[in-house]
Amino acid sequence: MSDYRLDINESINLSDYSLINDYLEIPRKNDKVSIKLNYRVKDEVNIICKILNNKGFNIIDKDRNGYIYANKRN
């Protein structure tokens, strides 16, 4: 089981979402992912959570400080 971390320091543009989507192909079953958004925009957090769900992740924790913790379910 591996742990992956992604720190995002600025606002996210359309091409960034594509890169995040590609990055989330790397984790395998039971791997964990921590994402920290330093530039917190509620819509960005929600979009990343949707990407995680679509990629087969369970959202373990999500807080208003821009922190998302998830694990791969399949």
Image (tube, grey):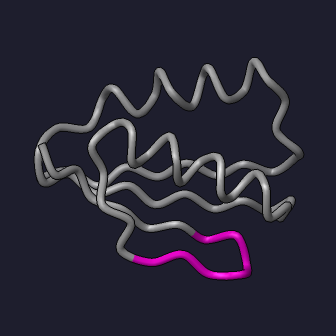
Lateral position of residue 63 relative to residue 72, left or right: right
Query: What residue is shown at x 40% (from left), y 33% (from top)?
Result: 24
In percent of width and height, residue 71 lies at: 27, 58
Lateral position of residue 64 relative to residue 2, left or right: right
Of residues 48 and 35, which is closer to you in this image? Answer: 48
In percent of width and height, residue 38 lies at: 80, 62
Query: What residue is shown at x 26% (from left), y 37% (from top)?
Result: 27
Q: Is residue 55 above or below residue 61?
A: above
How many numbered markers are drawn? 0
Q: Is residue 55 above or below residue 70?
A: above
In percent of width and height, residue 63 lies at: 62, 81
Lateral position of residue 14 relative to residue 31, left or right: right
Query: What residue is shown at x 54% (from left), y 75% (from top)?
Result: 62
In percent of width and height, residue 26 lies at: 30, 28
Q: Quadrant of residue 16?
A: top right
Find out whether residue 28 is within the magenta segment. Answer: no
Q: Which residues are magenta?
A: 61-67
Which quadrant of the figure contains the C terminus? top left
Query: What residue is shown at x 53% (from left), y 66% (from top)?
Result: 68
Find out whether residue 62 is within the magenta segment. Answer: yes
Q: Is residue 28 above or below residue 62?
A: above
